[in-house]
Amino acid sequence: MKKIIILLILFLQFSTYSQEDFEGILKFKIKIQDKTGQMTDEQTDMYVGNLQTYYLKGKKYKSEMNGMLKMMTYHEGKDTLFTKMNGVNTLMYSLSDESEEKVISYEFKKTDKVVLGYKCELLEVKTNKGFHQYYFNKDLKNSPTAYENHKMGLWDFFTEKTGGALSIIQISDVEDFKSSIELISVDRKKLDDSTFVKPNLPIVKMPE
């Protein structure tokens, strides 16, 4: 169950001051449907939450969820994602440079969607696990190489194909879950590196 929740968060993933790389805080409203039968929609809302906050700076990021699990993830810009859950006195790690999901095909489409003043383009992706719709605007972006090795959640593919653009809306339907996210707040600001330092706790491997 814990691994499924992590995958959910990574797909929820994921600017104007022209074309500067984004640094600051992004907030998303989220909706998740667990397809494994382990959690009802109500349980998912309760435990995982309906709001996700991202802190981004270069290759580093931190994510916070507002559910009862108070899940926090830390990526220090290398190849490992660390996860902390409420009531668990360990950090669980998974490798962000690995993914079982493989892209089969993709297509760019025009769209009339506008979110927070950003007129969206759409990248539709079919994979061996399902499909994704990735709405983006190149004014909200990071460096195209920032996540080039971040295969988990297909971050490497999305940012490569969009020139580093971050997701504004993302809709996913894969084997284990359906999810939708939408950007509701953009706060461009300088973040101290201490924001991304993981807690000093014992580290264990994320359960399969």
Image (cartoon, grey):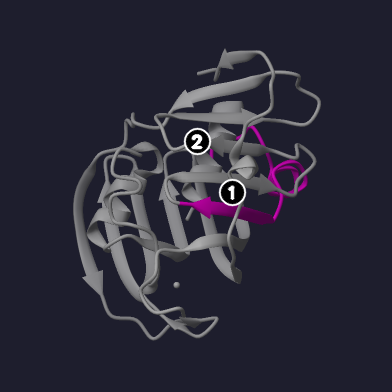
Amino acid, disc 2? Glu
User: Residue 101, position in %: x, y?
Assistant: 31, 37
Amino acid, disc 1? Gln
- CB atoms at circles 1 and 2 under 8 Å apart? no
In the image, is residue 53 part of the stretch drawn in magenta? yes
Q: Is residue 36 visible?
A: no
Estimate how packed mark 2 is, as few (under 14), some (14 to 19) or many (20 or more) residues with alpha carbons within 10 Å.
Answer: some
Estimate how packed mark 1 is, as few (under 14), some (14 to 19) or many (20 or more) residues with alpha carbons within 10 Å.
Answer: many
Q: Is residue 111 visible?
A: yes
Please state which of residues 176 and 82 is positioned toward the viewer in this rendering: 82
Please state which of residues 95 and 57 is positioned toward the viewer in this rendering: 57
Judging from the image, what secondary structure is the residue with disc 1 in? strand
N-terminal of the two: label 1 or label 2?
1
User: Residue 185, position in %: x, y?
Assistant: 62, 71
In the image, is residue 63 part of the stretch drawn in magenta? no
63 w.r.t. 136: above or below? above
- What residue is pinned by disc 2? 76
User: Residue 134, position in %: x, y?
Assistant: 38, 63
Judging from the image, what secondary structure is the residue with disc 2 in? loop
Q: Residue at x 34, y 32 (%)?
A: 99
Q: Which quadrant of the figure has residue 73?
A: top right
53 w.r.t. 169: above or below? above
In the rendered structure, the answer to whether residue 51 lies left or right of residue 35 reads right
- What residue is pinned by disc 1? 33
119 w.r.t. 78: above or below? below
Magenta residue span = 35-57
